[in-house]
Amino acid sequence: MQELELNKAFTLIESGPVVLVTTHDGKKDNIMTISWTMVMDFTPTFAITTGEWNHSYAALRKHRECVIAIPTVDLLDTVVGIGTCSGADTDKFVRFKLTPVPAKLVKPPLIKECLANIECKVIDIIEKHNIVVLEAVAAYIDGERQEKRTVHAVGDGTFIVDGRKIDRKKMMAAKLPPGV
């Protein structure tokens, strides 16, 4: 084994998939790209890592709701573009030609072009670690969408695309919640 620089260790376990998070600040919608996501359990609880460096963070703190939109590989350049400009001076829905769809339970919109969307409420913010804990209140998937492969950030400007699924549901049945 070769030694790896410690500041690059996160690239070995970078989470995924990369998601788009929509917020509403009381006046306008915004979108941010987030690659640091986490499923908290088999419950509909998730966490994202973000902070003051993201324009959307103030809206998350104040209005305590968002939508996690899950893009697919065909949207990768859009996802990167969204993550490299600021909502402070850019209408990202217009610039990236994305369609906002009204959510049912939160003010931020869904993104029509994404494979799936999850409406969320902020239930905790762990400021020491910039972790925003979210509870899902509604979820949607576009079953008609041809492209279903998501992308995962490595953390160094490269991405990994999902491959084929390998089924081990029977082996794991005792550990999975009913209906999964």
Image: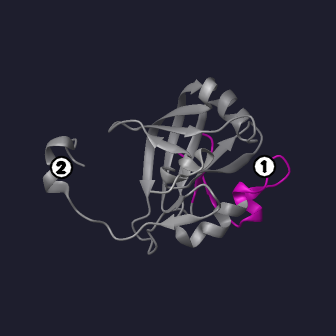
| Residue 163: quadrant of the picture | bottom left
| Residue 77: quadrant of the picture | bottom right
- Residue 172, numbered circle: 2
* Mark 1: secondary structure: loop
| Residue 177: quadrant of the picture | top left
Q: Amino acid at mark 2?
A: Met
The residue under the point 19% across, 55% down is: 169
Tell me which segment is drawn in magenta.
82-111
Q: Amino acid at mark 1?
A: Gly
State whether the magenta stretch is mostly helix, strand or loop: loop
The residue under the point 65% across, 34% down is: 60
Q: Is residue 17 toward the left or the right of residue 62 in the image? A: left
* Residue 95 position within the rendered picture, expressed as x and y whole percent measured from the top left: 77, 64
Q: 10 Å neighbourhood of mark 1: few (<14), some, or many (≥20)? A: some
Write down the residue under mark 1: 87
Q: Is residue 58 toward the left or the right of residue 35 in the image? A: right
Which one is nearer the viewer's eye here, 14 or 133? 14
**In which quadrant of the rendered image does the N terminus lie?**
bottom left
| Mark 2 / mark 1, whichever is N-terminal | 1
- Determine the CA span between mark 2 and mark 1: 43 Å
Does residue 21 sit above or below 96 in this rendering? above
- Can residue 115 be spotted in the picture? yes
- Residue 28, numbered circle: none
* Residue 124 position within the rendered picture, expressed as x and y whole percent measured from the top left: 54, 25
Does residue 100 sit above or below 145 in this rendering? above
* Residue 12 position within the rendered picture, expressed as x and y whole percent measured from the top left: 49, 53
Q: Residue furthest bottom?
A: 146
